[in-house]
Image: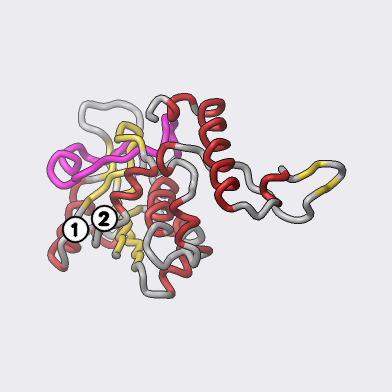
Amino acid sequence: MRIDILTVLPELLESPLNHSIVKRAKEKGLVEINVINLRNFTTDKYKTVDDYAFGGGAGMVMMIEPVFKAIEKLKSERHYDEIIYTSPDGEKFSQKLANRLSILNNIIILAGHYKGVDQRIRDNLITREISIGDYVLSGGEMPAAIIADAIVRLIPGAISDEQSALSDSFQDDLLAPPVYTRPSEFKGWKVPEILLSGNTGEIEKWRHDQSVERTRKLRPDLADNE
């Protein structure tokens, strides 16, 4: 898989995309992630990527030309399955969407910034808009990193124990069950006896029941999807 992220602040993505599971997936050759500076696609000496909005109003707008040039250059080199724009008014990011994106080959993520991007880019080049939640951040770099991380960890081989990814929270619209490790008792707080029984079938049943109970209690909106 290849993920190209277009941004005006590439330094914000250096750490999130170079550690942990994402780093290991890159080292294994399972994914290639390129952070592309939109300022490299400007024509003026100041590397300008934003301008005032027509009609007035507060805030600056990402200019159409550098974004268009960057996307067109990438598209001239390969086919992209999705060109994603991180936006507060996009569809809500979810585990199901991450699952669908993880089986694609090539993705562009345009990290929104300032007051947004020239609408003509959204109308003519973007294939999917994604929001990570109902709040506003300083820019789309962190959402882009979150989307990339969620996708990469689902690629076969990215996690040594692939079953771990399949049992994550939100798979099957359920929260993950509680987990414990040694010691089995600490300050009088004990691990549930069922987990120490060695009875795999009963343990799995307990975990499923716990997932259902936790989902109904903590995220009733997910429980409604059962």
Q: Position of residue 196 (x, y in %)?
A: 71, 51
Residue nearest the viewer, comparing 186 with 155: 186
Looking at the image, residue 72 sits to the left or right of residue 162; the answer is left
Residue plotted at (35% across, 64% down) = 33
The residue carrying mark 2 is 108
- Which circle's residue, 2 or 1, is located before the other in the chain? 1
Residue plotted at (31% across, 40% down) = 130
Q: Position of residue 141 (x, y in %)?
A: 41, 49
| Res 191 → quadrant | top right
Q: What numbered label is drawn on residue 151? A: none
Q: Position of residue 54 (x, y in %)?
A: 21, 31
Mark 1 element type: loop
Distance from label 2 to label 1 (Cα)? 7 Å
Residue plotted at (19% across, 45% down) = 127
In the rendered structure, which segment of residues is drawn in magenta?
A: 114-137
Mark 2 element type: strand
Residue nearest the viewer, comparing 16 with 193: 193
Disc 2 + disc 1, Cβ < 8 Å: yes
Quadrant showing the N terminus = bottom left
The residue carrying mark 1 is 80
Residue plotted at (34% across, 65% down) = 34
User: The disc labelled 1 sits on which kind of residue?
Assistant: Tyr
Q: Position of residue 194 (x, y in %)?
A: 68, 45
Quadrant showing the C terminus = top left
